[in-house]
Image (cartoon, rainbow, N blue to C red):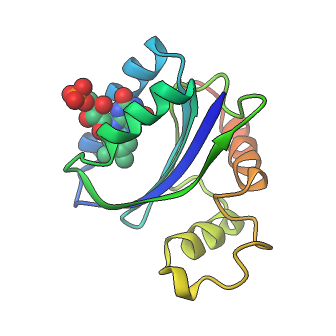
Amino acid sequence: MYNLVYKSIANSLTPAQIDEILIESRDFNGKNDITGCLIYHEGFFVQYLEGDAEIVLALFDKIRVDKRHYEVILLSHGNIYSREFDTWSMAYLSNQLPNEAFKYVKLMVSPEEEIPNMSVVPNPTSKKFWIAAKTVLNKIGHNNFN
Ligand SMILES: Cc1cc2nc3c(=O)[nH]c(=O)nc-3n(C[C@H](O)[C@H](O)[C@H](O)COP(=O)(O)O)c2cc1C
């Protein structure tokens, strides 16, 4: 099992266009045993993908050239023992992020040199961050996110 996290800058997208990304993602991911979470905040995406390494990497090759976003930067990747988002083919969080999480997402999408102490902040390269995201998803309920 393998996971990766990247950030990117969204091209101006309508809610319908974001829905389209989610529909497309959930269809492909569901068929290919990929799970994860997409965060959209103030024009930035942060995405967590997990699944078979070959499939995740092949998908990331497609995602990184997708014209709906740019400046795709890989933040972390590696082997994992178990999934974080096992019941979500692609969870989605945007305005439901609590203030605390917003703080980390803001940090995360700021230029590298402006990120203080990346190693001690629970940012999206850390498991802690995604567990917090999962807690939010569980609170909101599953219905809109499968
Ligand atoms: C921010 C973002 C996240 C995406 N996430 C996924 C995803 O999780 N799974 C997926 O199949 N496609 C995802 N896509 C869409 C892919 O980039 C691509 O359009 C899709 O894989 C279809 O590619 P194809 O027509 O070459 O097969 C995402 C696109 C964007 C912009």
At x 57%, y 70%, the residue is 108
Tell me: residue 113, above or below residue 67.
Answer: below
Q: Quadrant of residue 4?
A: top right
| Residue 34 falls left or right of residue 70 | right
Q: Nearer the viewer, residue 78 or 72?
A: 78
Q: Quadrant of residue 57?
A: top left
| Residue 110 falls left or right of residue 80 | left
| Residue 139 falls left or right of residue 70 | right
Q: Nearer the viewer, residue 141 or 13?
A: 13
At x 58%, y 66%, the residue is 105
| Residue 83 falls left or right of residue 106 | right
Tell me: residue 37, above or below residue 130.
Answer: above
Q: Residue furthest top?
A: 31
At x 34%, y 40%, the residue is 61
- Ligand 1 shows up in the quarter that is top left
Residue 15 placed where, x, y %?
Answer: 29, 47
- The answer to whether residue 28 of the structure is visible from this angle is yes
- The answer to whether residue 9 of the structure is visible from this angle is no
Tell me: residue 46, above or below residue 43.
Answer: above
Quarter of the image that includes the N terminus: top right
Q: Nearer the viewer, residue 95 or 118?
A: 118
Q: How many marks?
A: 0
Residue 121 placed where, x, y %?
Answer: 76, 72
